[in-house]
Amino acid sequence: MIFKVYFQDKINEVPVRERTNTLYIEATSEEDVRSKLIDRGYNIEFITPVDGAYLDYEKQSENYKVLEI
């Protein structure tokens, strides 16, 4: 399953909408996503599964790239 992760680059950075980044990652669960990203030092705000029509919409974005870990 593909998950969309909203995050800040630094673990101690306060979440601010204008500096929020996103990435897409393939994983089996939200816990799996967090374990794959633990060593990157991101301040993860939100993780949401992406499927169906929402996934099709996201694939049209030029920023859509699934991170493979």
Image (cartoon, helix red, strand yellow):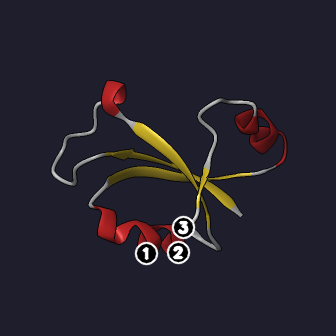
The residue under label 1 is 35
Residue holding disc 2: 32
Name the side, left or right, on which 69 lies relative to 65.
left
Give the image location of residue 19, x and y in percent: 32, 30
- Mark 1 residue type: Ser
- Badge 3 crowding class, 10 Å Cα cut-off, few under 14, some 14 to 19, many 20 or more, is some
Decide: marks 2, 1 in contact (CB < 8 A)? Answer: yes
Q: Position of residue 49 (x, y in %)?
A: 65, 55
For residue 53, side relative to residue 22 (left or right): right
In the image, is 11 to the left or to the right of 26?
Answer: left
Q: In 3D space, how far apart are the residues under numbered discs 2 and 1 (Cα atoms)?
A: 5 Å
Nearer to the camera, 5 or 65: 65
Q: Quadrant of residue 59?
A: top right
Dot 2 amino acid type: Asp
Residue 7 percent location from the top left of the image = 38, 46
The circle on residue 2 is none
Kind of element beneath mark 2: helix
Mark 1 burial class by Cα count in 10 Å: few <14, some 14-19, many 20+ = few
Mark 3 and mark 1 lie on one chain; the one further toward the N terminus is: 3
How far is disc 3 from disc 1 in space, using C-alphas? 9 Å
46 in relation to 17, above or below: below
* Residue name at image x 67 percent, y 30 percent: 61
Quadrant hosting residue 28: bottom right
Residue type marked 3: Glu
Residue 62, image x, y percentages: 64, 30
Mark 3 and mark 2 residues within 8 Å of each other at the beta carbon? yes
Residue on which the image places disc 3: 30
Asked if marks 3 and 1 touch (Cβ < 8 Å), the reply is no
Q: Nearer the viewer, residue 23 or 49?
A: 23
